[in-house]
Image (cartoon, helix red, strand yellow):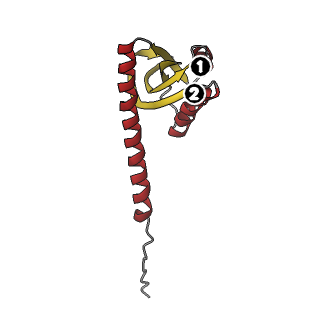
């Protein structure tokens, strides 16, 4: 199995739920084909070097995975027909220096992923406390 990195850019007009669904769709394709997903790095909204399909910005996402080489054709075919994806690129890491760099990228993306999840759980724990019911009293003058 080879080490791969797929970067894809999603249209900036999508909502957070639609963006999450698009990322889930790509990871589902990889899992269905037998790839081992190592990390997902959602890089957020970035400015494109040049307009693509009249978009000046895009949401960048990188998926690091291990897979057989035959999976790449299926992945890129699906990305090509997905109207929400405006650009994509797959890179294979083959020699030892590249694989060492790949491992560093995966650990960095995993740390970012864990930090993001920790922030989300902290916000979720704080939210119920902030929504504590308050009592109001009204005085009516006659």
Q: Position of residue 107 (x, y in %)?
A: 37, 31
Element marked by disc 1: helix
Give the labeled residue for mark 2: 26
* Mark 1, other Cα within 10 Å: few <14 / some 14–19 / many ≥20: some
Q: Position of residue 106 (x, y in %)?
A: 40, 28
- Check whether the beta carbons of the residues at disc 2 and disc 1 lie within 8 A of each other: yes
Which quadrant of the figure has residue 116? top left
Query: Disc 2 and disc 1: Cα gap in Å?
Result: 8 Å
* Mark 2, other Cα within 10 Å: few <14 / some 14–19 / many ≥20: some
Residue 41, labelled with which disc?
Answer: none
Residue 89 or 95: which is nearer the viewer?
Answer: 95
Name the residue: 43% across, 32% down. Answer: 42
104 relative to 118, above or below: above
Element marked by disc 2: helix
Give the farthest residue toward the bottom. Answer: 142
Residue 56 or 128: which is nearer the viewer?
Answer: 128
Q: Position of residue 115 (x, y in %)?
A: 37, 42
> Which of the image's four quarters has the C terminus?
bottom left
Residue 75, labelled with which disc?
Answer: 1
45 relative to 81, above or below: below
Give the farthest residue toward the top. Answer: 95
Name the residue: 44% across, 55% down. Answer: 124
**Is any atom of residue 86 visible in this view?**
yes
Name the residue: 64% across, 28% down. Answer: 32
52 relative to 35, above or below: above
């Amino acid at each position: 199995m080879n080490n791969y990195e797929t970067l894809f850019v999603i249209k900036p007009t999508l909502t957070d739920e639609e963006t999450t669904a698009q990322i889930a769709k790509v990871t589902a394709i990889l899992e269905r084909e037998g790839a081992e997903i190592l990390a997902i790095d959602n890089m957020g909204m970035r400015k494109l070097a040049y307009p693509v399909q009249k978009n000046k910005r895009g949401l960048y996402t990188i998926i690091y995975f291990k897979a057989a080489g035959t999976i790449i054709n299926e992945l890129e075919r699906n990305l090509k027909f997905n109207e929400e994806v405006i650009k994509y690129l797959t890179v294979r890491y083959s020699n030892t220096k590249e694989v060492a760099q790949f491992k560093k990228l995966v650990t960095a993306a995993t740390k970012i992923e864990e930090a993001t999840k920790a922030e989300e759980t902290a916000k979720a724990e704080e939210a119920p406390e902030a929504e504590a019911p308050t009592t109001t009293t009204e005085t009516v003058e006659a």
